[in-house]
Amino acid sequence: MRKTQGDCLFCKIASGEAKVPFVYEDEHVVAFDDISPKAAVHTLIVPKEHIENLNDEPSSELLSNVFGAVPAVAHIKGIDETGYRIIQNNGDDARQTVHHLHVHMQGGEQLPE
Ligand code: AMP
Ligand code: ZN
């Protein structure tokens, strides 16, 4: 599996080629606000390594890097105390539109049931 994919939007964002302000960055992960927010806070957490979704069997290390960043991102966004939802879409029926694994963090208000 390639580490990055040339035609992938989130590879371009994560590498800095496409300029998007980062909420958070570490060695393995970036986070940035969703361009089309579905909640008061809607931030995406994205591994720098390209992998399409969970069907590609990401390593436990990659998953740990993504989920390990969650508390820091929630704290930066000011929603760690109030709560948040994590969503991760895989494939067409889930309406995955960007084929680079990512998790959505939503919060900042009472979310729908
Ligand atoms: P998904 O449907 O799970 O693949 O989610 C992809 C998300 O990426 C959607 O919520 C889009 O609004 C978001 N998105 C697409 N392009 C950008 C962009 N340039 N910057 C930030 N978010 C984006
Ligand atoms: Zn990618």
Image (cartoon, rainbow, N blue to C red):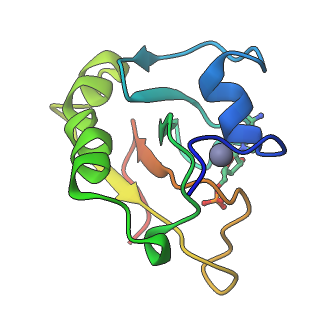
Q: Toward the viewer: 39 or 50?
A: 50
Q: Residue at x 32, y 43 (%)?
A: 66
Residue 86 pos. (x, y %): 35, 55
Q: Toward the viewer: 8 or 95?
A: 8
Asked which quadrant contains residue 13, the reply is top right
Left or right of 74 in this view: 14: right
Left or right of 87 in this view: 11: right
* Count of numbered marks: 0
Q: Residue at x 22, y 57 (%)?
A: 60
Residue 47 pos. (x, y %): 45, 39
Q: Residue at x 54, y 56 (%)?
A: 51
- Residue located farthest toward the bottom when viewing the structure as drawn: 93
Residue 64 pos. (x, y %): 21, 47
Left or right of 30 in this view: 57: left
- Residue located farthest toward the left when viewing the structure as drawn: 81
- Residue located farthest toward the front when viewing the structure as drawn: 1
Image quadrant for the C terminus? bottom left
Image quadrant for the N terminus? bottom right
Asked which quadrant contains residue 78, the reply is top left
- Compared with 1, 18 (above or below) is above
Q: Toward the viewer: 96 or 16?
A: 16
- Compared with 37, 93 (above or below) is below
Residue 59 pos. (x, y %): 29, 58
Asked which quadrant contains residue 10, the reply is top right
Q: Toward the viewer: 33 or 55?
A: 55
Q: Residue at x 68, y 60 (%)?
A: 99
- Compared with 40, 105 (above or below) is below
